[in-house]
Amino acid sequence: MQDHEIAYWIEKETWRQQNHLELIASENFVSLDVLSAQGSVLTNKYAEGYPGRRYYGGCFAVDEIEKLAIQRACSLFRCRFANVQPHSGSQANQAVFLSVLSPGDCILSLDLRAGGHLSHGAPVNISGKWFRVVSYGVDPVTHRIDEAVVRELAFQHRPKLLIAGASAYPRFINFAFFRALADEIGAIFMADIAHIAGLVVSNQHPSPFPHAHVVTTTTHKTLRGPRGGLILCNEPDLAKRIDSAIFPGLQGGPLMHVIAAKAVCFKEAMGAEFQNYGHRIVKNAKALAHALMAQGIELIAKGTDTHLLLVDLRMHALSGRQAEALLEEVHITCNKNGIPQDPRSAVHTSGLRLGTPAITTRGLEEHHMEIIATCITQRLHDPENSSLTQSIRDQVLALCKAHPLPYN
Ligand SMILES: *Cc1c(COP(=O)(O)O)cnc(C)c1O
């Protein structure tokens, strides 16, 4: 690369990825095929519109790529229609809002502080500014979605759109319940499976289909594809409205290089290896949860059904922010996170979100989770001990070296 400044920092980031344990629940490591599709000449092509209906010439090759991406998405998720153009998960959600809501309409969704996502109606997000948002939380003791409360709110506020889906919720979501409720109140039910898409296609989490009217997701979390979004549904009329909402409603030209990488990811996710990968993600998450709890660490919802866990630091002297920084020093990367009824502010937080998708891609197994749990608890219990700090960092580095990423 001629640009030495950028080349230098890409090299630094490659080093960081190689030499840190990535426990951020929303991150992953893509295959070299996904990486090369995304780094291809397809980035040069303008293709506003859809296959066979473009506003630019020269689209014969990218048309075939987008058609393959759509076909593969539909067969992977077992549905009739897919829009593979959303630039991100947030834009996929905005497109659903644009296609089924008018400004001022009511949305019922999971509270951000209970594990929901910004794009589901947080006051700082466009969704919270343009729609009337009512949110449900989780039970203060079990930390599970309280279906009786959701029902009560639904009948009280009569939302036009009911949303299920989360960024920091470690238990299964009951999509059948949400659909039955949506039918009772005449609402549209959207399932946002951004975090769990890879678990859904590997049969580790119940599928949102046939329950959801519309499903949105990212492609870069457990699904292990390029950074991007995806919208799925079964109704032709809804599919048409969603296509118009993405283009020309919200976006201009699609990122054809990213769409090609999505197609590669969908094919990878159809294979037997990916079924096994999803299974290993969950096994590792449960092993990490058990090991942490055995060492005296409290978890929200007392464990996990999925790829993620939320450490509960309410009784701990350290905030989420401090814990995140201490772990970073020993090459363990994770993020602070608010928890239900968090006594600390959104800047400090009382939670730490951990996930196993990325380390599972690296090949780490259940017996490594005990080592990682010990590293985490020792670091948080004795942060001033510098020889311990060094020995933890050495153990983490040894795990990284033994399980290298295929990048250079
Ligand atoms: C990550 C996430 C998104 C948004 O994805 P971006 O690509 O970052 O915009 C949307 N919904 C949920 C539930 C998520 O976890």
Image (cartoon, rainbow, N blue to C red):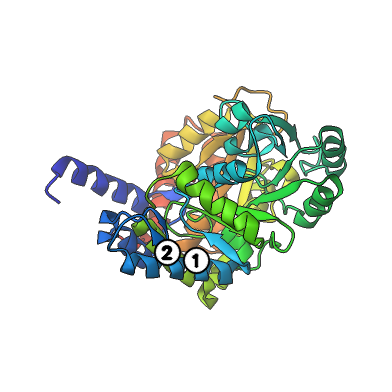
Total numbered labels: 2
Mark 1 in CB contact with mark 2 (< 8 angstroms): yes
Tell me what residue is drawn at x 42 percent, y 64 percent: 51
Tell me what residue is drawn at x 29 percent, y 58 percent: 39
Q: Identify the residue under disc 1.
A: 70
Marked residue nearer the N-terminal end (1 or 2): 2
Report whether residue 403 is seen.
no
Give the quarter of the figure containing the C terminus: bottom left
Question: Which x, y percent locates residue 94?
Answer: 56, 41
Give left or right: position of 279 versus 6.
right
Most extreme residue toward the bottom is 272
Tell me what residue is drawn at x 86 percent, y 48 percent: 184
Q: In front: mark 1 or mark 2?
A: 2
Question: Which x, y percent locates residue 263?
Answer: 44, 66
Decide if ligand 1 comes within 8 Å of the CB at mark 1.
no
| Dot label at residue 51 | 2
Q: Amino acid at mark 1?
A: Ile
Tell me what residue is drawn at x 47 percent, y 54 percent: 220
